Amino acid sequence: MIKKFVVFLCLAMFAYAGDATVEIVKKIDVLPKIAVQDASPKNVDVSSRQSFYKLIAGDLRVSSHFNVLDEYLQSSYEGGPLENFLSDKKVDMILRFSLTHDMNAATANVKLINAKTGATTFEKVYSITDKSRNPFLAHKIVIDINDQIGAPTVKWMEQSVIFSRYTDAKKSEIVISDYTLSYTKTIVTGGLNIFPKWANTEQSAFYYTSFGGSEPTIYLYDLKDGRRRSIISSAGMLVCSDVSKDGKKLLLTMAPKDQPDIYLYETQTRKITKITDYSGIDVNGNFIDDDKRIAFVSDRLGSPDIFAQGIYDKSFEKLVYHGKNKNSISTYDNYIVYSSREADSEFGRNTFNLYLISTKTDYLRQLTATGENLYPRFAKDPDTIMFIKQFGNQSALGIIRLNANKTYQFPLKTGKLQSIDW
Amino acid sequence: MGKLALTSLAVAVLVLTGCSQKSPEVDMTKGTSDTKGATNDGMSALQKLIASLEANSKTIYFDFDKYNVRKDQQSNIDANAALFNSAEAKSFSIKVEGNCDEFGTDEYNYALGLKRAKSVKDGLVAKGMVADRITVVSYGESNPASTEHNKEAWAKNRRAEFKVLP
């Protein structure tokens, strides 16, 4: 009897251990129910049409602002009485698209229809010169449709993601993608290329570390002309951890004397200022408080933890008192999201969870419950966080929608994610 | 049609910034091959000596999340110092490569690998090697000795290895 009870208890615990965010912050009352209709001409191949449907329906779901009808529907673009109301589906609105391809370009005519009245409330034509970038077309459409219902913006969907993925021992490549990994383009291959970081808000250039030379070197890669130039080299390790809002200052982790510390690098003058000075590990500097201070990870109190100090002020303070192994952080104004190792297990897989805190209050929120959740990064708005989910040799991009309390995962088809930025 | 008057019709050509104006792809390995001095069997005498020294060096292993040299690894440090200070090796530089297990994909893991390499360098210097001969680098979790997912594999991956440089 006791044995049965223990088994039941274990099953109940595993059933509850989903990867959902733990705290419910805001309950959205009733989401508008939306159907997506494909009105593309018959000469457009079915797979393109259906994948475009999936992209739009997926974006609507991830926005967390719609109740999406899970059914692929077709219609004419003008629509008839049945198509404009979908009475049997009991939807509030219809997003209708007509996708066409012309050589390498793609165009989507889009309508938003009030399914109660049959009236078109929004109509727009979207086009893109490279049809392989269709996912960005879908994201742009959903950003506009989301705006039409007055929901908080989801403009973060059109941010490009840049990541490094391991392909073999000491080998990794740098790839640009959309947030769903539906569009991917490999930019840098050959050797070990890690820690890519967007150089500006326009996402027209990025920094990354290459191990191709005698020492780790940070390059700046300009996407407009495909040229790269060497920025700085250092023995031991070298990472561009953060870029200031104006793009003129970088926080680097480097080890010119074999000792990892955080440095400020000014891009216009190439001036380097050593910020931290500790004989253990100081890494992962992030600008906070209008770029006047930094938050960073250090083992100065025995295990990796999160600290803050001024750029020109050596006194430091511990920022987080919860947990004991915080190994990666990202900041957005007064908020810090961090990854924390929950166990010191040498013999089994470790659990890493994400937490959100405020530097101004004692606010603390656990964002994940199971698995290896690493490398959190804020979007351009603080309501959305991207992270790496690891499963042995496989990984996925995770998206957390904080206000909706939802998590989504997009698996990487090949390779293992090393780091991400967006 | 009357209600269509409420409809906004806009044509938007998306200028999606960022990626692909010129297919800008870089292969970091181009132009890095070095076959100077190769003999018929593909290796020069120098290359053979370097390969032999590297093969005879002893890998240093570390505890989970630690970068101090364990007591049971000290004899390997001593042996490596003797090897690298031998007459045939004395003119070479030594690169110590620090490595980590698969847990963590972040800067901390790379720093942990670097501290392991640094601990080994300090140990070699304490045994009489000249510090200027030794460089350190971290490969974080990118260079596993074993790709399996068990405690034996993870223990094998928490290590420092040696490269002999002419």
Image (spheres, grey):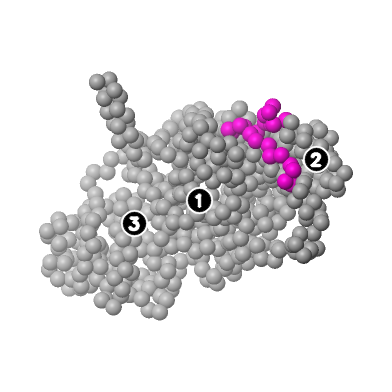
Chain under callout 2: B
What residue lies at 36% left-to-right and 40% top-to-bottom?
A19
Q: How far apart are marks 2 and 3 (CA)?
A: 60 Å
On whether residue A4 falls in the magenta region, the answer is no
Q: Are marks 2 and 1 in contact (CB under 8 Å)?
A: no
Q: How far apart are marks 2 and 1 (CA)?
A: 38 Å
Query: At label 1, which amino acid type do we have?
Result: Leu
Query: At label 3, which amino acid type do we have?
Result: Asp
Foreground tag (2 vs 1): 2
Foreground tag (1 vs 3): 1
Can residue B156 be seen here? The reply is yes
- Residue A7, by quadrant, is top left
Can residue B105 be seen here? The reply is no
Using the image as rendered, state which of residue B103 and residue A340 is in the foreground. B103
Q: Where is residue A241 in the image (x, y as percent from the top left)?
A: 59, 47
Q: Position of residue B165 (x, y in %)?
A: 78, 51
- The residue identified by callout 3 is A59
Q: How crowded is mark 3: few (under 14 residues within 10 Å), some or many (20 or more)?
A: many
Answer above or below: position of B143 versus A44.
above
Q: In the image, which residues are magenta?
A: B54-74
Q: Where is residue A290 in the image (x, y as percent from the top left)?
A: 56, 44
What residue lies at 45% left-to-right and 30% top-to-bottom?
A362
Confirm whether circles 1 and 3 share one chain: yes
Foreground tag (2 vs 3): 2
Q: Which mark is on residue A417? A: 1
Q: Residues within 10 Å of mark 1 (few under 14, many from 20)?
A: many
- The residue identified by callout 2 is B83
Using the image as rendered, state which of residue A19 and residue B49 is in the foreground. B49
Q: How far apart are marks 1 and 3 (CA)?
A: 22 Å
Quadrant of the drawing holding the N terminus of chain A: top left
